[in-house]
Image: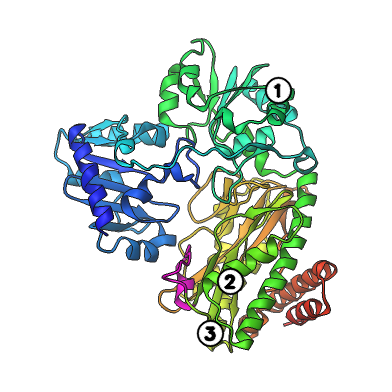
Amino acid sequence: MNTYTERLAAFRVEMEAAGVDAAIVPQADPHLGEYLASHWQVRRWLSGFTGSAGDLVVTATKAALWTDSRYFIQAAKQLEGSGIELMKDGLADTPSIVDWLCAQLPEASTVGIDGMLFTMPQVNDMAAKFASKGIKLNSRFDVIDRLWTDRPALPDGKIFIHDEKYAGESAIAKIAKIMAEAHSAGADAVLMTALDEIAWTLNIRSNDVKHTPVATAFLYLADGAATLFTDPAKLDDTVKAYLASQGVATLPYSDIKTFLAAIPDDVKVLADTTKSSAALLEILGERTLDSGITTAARLKSVKNETQIAGVHNAMVRDGAALVKSFMEIEDRLEKGTATTELDVADILHKYRSQGENYFDESFGTIAGYGPHGAIVHYEADENSASTLRPEGLLLVDSGAQYLDGTTDITRTVCLGTPTADERRDFTLVMKGHIALAKAVFPEGTRGAQLNVLAEQYLWQNGLSYLHGTGHGVGFFLSVHEGPHSIRLNWVDAPMLPGSITSDEPGLYREGIHGIRCENLVLCRERMDTEFGKFLGFEVLTLFPFDRSLFDKSIMTPDEIEWVDTYHATVRERLLPALDTEAQKSWLIAHTEPI
């Protein structure tokens, strides 16, 4: 860990020179998305922790990193020897970053942050709490360029057009809808900073973020004056002509601050303060109108009929690729061919990439064998990868980006004869999965009101998991998208017909095994009665669960029927997509009634 202790030492020198007594380094970029291009992986560079969530705090004598339950095991290993204390965010006895700093720092101290990496509510909340303890907040602390001398450049992937035959709607039409709602809210213009919202609005894509086909850009919309701020090198003549045809001009990415500063004082600009950087909103000042959840985010989450048809087709190709992948994994085990967790990821990539409209994986494959399955967001490397054996559980969480849809699926399979404990744990997870998949609920229901359906059977047995149960999924976009989600904490965004969400309860026994069972589900209208509209879910994912892991003694007849009906659907949809009789025989055997 000498590399990271040396980097922290150099960082502290810069802090002292700037008059900063502590600094907060978030896992964030100026677009405040979940997944970052390498240019903005500052927290990773300073700490060595590679998880996608977690914030580093550095004082003159201490350092600590806050991350959530998905990364507790991983972070403990990666931070070992670095001098950075792991703070398990979400646990009752873990203080917040602000509370911890207030306890560490004397009065008249200064905390430094880069205001481009925080929202305005975050900055205002920190500033108020620090002020109550006599601590100042400096939101212009940005010294990393002087330290990270070989810092990757800003992403320069080429922008390409996402054809309307996949998107189902033109950029002109989307812009018109966004501007109509902006005018209704009393705004003259809209500032968009979220990369997935910009990509969706303009029907453009790129490869600036690993596994997420977005382009690094800002977007400003006004009547007849839309402007995309991005690196000119990302635009070829075809894309320039396309953008012009949609009424979109372009300016360099770095021009965003001067552009915003020049907007007349009487122009009201609608922006989501929870997604826009505080530094940009500070420039806009009184011209800012808070949009709450943006129109683009809400519209993007509701897939149109063209997109829904595309996702159905993508799921067939994805399921067929999974059949071929798991057949090869089983064959290698039977023959005694050495197969590691990395090999599992390679096999999945091989078969998926052969499919029509394949673009990329939708995230790095999680293949966790045995104890590694208990590391929720485990990613194997050459040093950690376990070799599979004909025993125990293998958890595989994977997905793909297709031009006509994004997939995300988790299956837990037994590589030998399952134990009673393995079958019981698996079945308790599946009972919750089934309960959520079968749910019918009134229009306006939030995800937090559904979460108990997935966790109830675990809770009844003194078991639990700490990650969310369901996240929104984009369309050839982010595998994690909002605004809705299914989780314990309240997210004030209702489930909407046309939205796609994951259904993925789990159970993780550290040092033993991990279990997660995930399908993607489409929210649909179920009925309209005198009591209002009721919604439910249509299962999209097509691949069998491991039949050997079901313990029918703790299942109801309805649950058994659900599994058998789902497997019958998988068989019907996937058989025509398979190439050989061996593949078809495998699928038939794995979809027999339990």
Where disc 3 sits, the SS reads loop
Percent coordinates x, y for residue 246 in the rendering: 72, 25
Q: CA distance from mark 1 to mark 2?
A: 44 Å
Q: Is residue 524 magenta?
A: no
**Which numbered disc, 2 or 3, marks the residue that appears first in the sequence?**
2
Residue for badge 3:
389
Of callouts 1 and 3, which one flags the residue occurring earlier in the amino acid sequence? 1
- Asked if the residues shown at circle 1 and circle 2 are in contact, with their CB atoms under 8 angstroms apart, the answer is no
SS assignment at label 2: helix
**What is the quadrant of residue 351 in the picture?**
bottom right
Instruction: Give the side of residue 295 with respect to residue 8, left or right.
Output: right
Task: State the image coordinates of residue 125 (x, y, percent, origin top left).
Answer: 34, 35
Count up the numbered dots: 3
Amino acid bearing label 2: Val
Task: Give the crowd class for mark 1: few <14, some 14-19, many >=20 residues within 10 Å.
Answer: few
Q: Position of residue 382 (x, y in %)?
A: 45, 69
Residue visible at 59% across and 89% down? 417
Q: Position of residue 119 (x, y in %)?
A: 42, 34
Alpha carbons under labels 1 and 3: distance apart: 57 Å
Q: Is residue 515 above or below residue 422?
A: above
Residue 344, which numbered label?
A: 2
Q: Main secondary structure of the magenta part?
A: loop
Instruction: Identify the magenta region.
Output: 370-385
In the depicted view, which residue is nearer to us: 583 or 534?
583
